[in-house]
Image: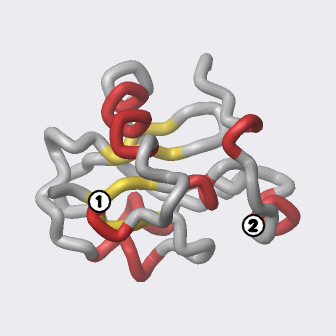
Amino acid sequence: MTHVVGESCIGCKYTDCVSVCPVECFHEGPNFLVIDPEVCIDCGVCVAECPVEAIYDEKDLPDGQKDYVALNARLAARWPLITQSTEPLPEADEWASRQGKRDQLVEVA
């Protein structure tokens, strides 16, 4: 099992989770973060740090977000590693409460 970044991160990209990760498993795309399942040690410290509750244990992903397991793995292989917290996206607070954001995910950097 691993932890997975879900839909709530889209458009926000808060990076509080990155600064607490002991193994540097986060990768950064244009408007989303992902966790590399090959690196994640399933410690869970990132879960409590996410202000939009976007990080789940793989087995706890909400219905309709199960495909984020494969999505995180695929994008982690393509996107650059992020090892330090940065500022969230400019309109992160506005995006934080939105639902159904999957079609807004930008996969190409």
What residue is rendered at 39% in x and 19% in y?
78
Number of the label disc, if any, that sits on residue 83: none
Number of the label disc, if any, that sits on residue 96: 2
Q: Quadrant of the C terminus?
A: top right
Determine the residue located farthest toward the bottom in the rendered image: 48
Compared to residue 89, the image places residue 42 above or below, namely: below
Which residue type does callout 1 highlight?
Glu
Horizontal side of 5 relative to 73 (left or right) equals right
Identify the element where label 2 is drawn.
helix
Identify the element where label 1 is drawn.
helix
Point out the frontmost of discs 1 and 2. 1
Horizontal side of 14 relative to 2 (left or right) equals right
Q: Splitting the image into 4 quarters, where does residue 77 fall?
A: top left
In the image, residue 16 lies at what x, y percent? 49, 68
Q: Between residue 90 and residue 7, name the one nearer to us.
A: 7
What residue is rendered at 70% in x and 56% in y?
12
> Callout 2 environment at 10 Å: few (<14), some (14 to 19), or many (20+)?
some
Number of the label disc, if any, that sits on residue 58: 1
The answer to whether residue 20 is visible is no
What residue is rendered at 44% in x and 41% in y?
67
Q: Quadrant of the N terminus?
A: bottom left
Between the C-alphas of marks 1 and 2, the distance is: 21 Å
What residue is rendered at 29% in x and 59% in y?
58
